[in-house]
Amino acid sequence: MKLLGIGFGNLVNSDRIIAVVEPDSNPVKRLISTSKEKAMLIDATQGRKTKSVIIMDSDHIILSYLSAKNLNEKLNGEESV
């Protein structure tokens, strides 16, 4: 199990991530709304602007303030110090 930092000390199991997407499109906005209604939404933004949406294999949706590009770099071990 590899944990991925998604900001503010929050971690997710990277093995269970299906996709990391930008939050701007209407389908993603509907996905966020639907998951909120089902109580499957996890907001890890600490009140900041949502820059990426992480879709998990458990049907949970996680909001992060880190960009999808930044999360991709972290996943691939390219994180700059």
Image (spheres, rainbow, N blue to C red):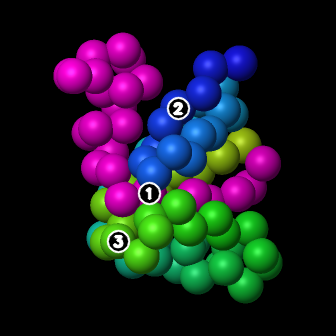
* SS state under label 1: strand
The first of marks 1 and 3 along the sequence is 3
- Spatial CA distance of label 2 from label 3 is 19 Å
Q: Which residue is mark 3?
A: 48
Residue under the image location 42 percent in, 76 percent down: 47
1 and 3 marks in contact (CB < 8 Å): no
* 7, above or below 29, in the image: above
Residue 52 lies, in percent from the top left, at 38, 56
Q: Which residue is mark 2?
A: 4
Q: Which residue is mark 1?
A: 64
In the image, the segment drawn in magenta is 58-81
- The amino acid on which the numbered mark 2 sits, given as a three-letter code, is Leu
Residue appearing at x 56%, y 47% in the figure: 10
Looking at this view, is 42 or 37 the one in front?
A: 42
Q: Is residue 79 left or right of residue 54?
A: left
Q: Residue at x 21, y 22 (%)?
A: 80
Query: Residue 50, percent across and down?
Result: 37, 67
What is the three-letter code of the residue carrying label 1? Ser
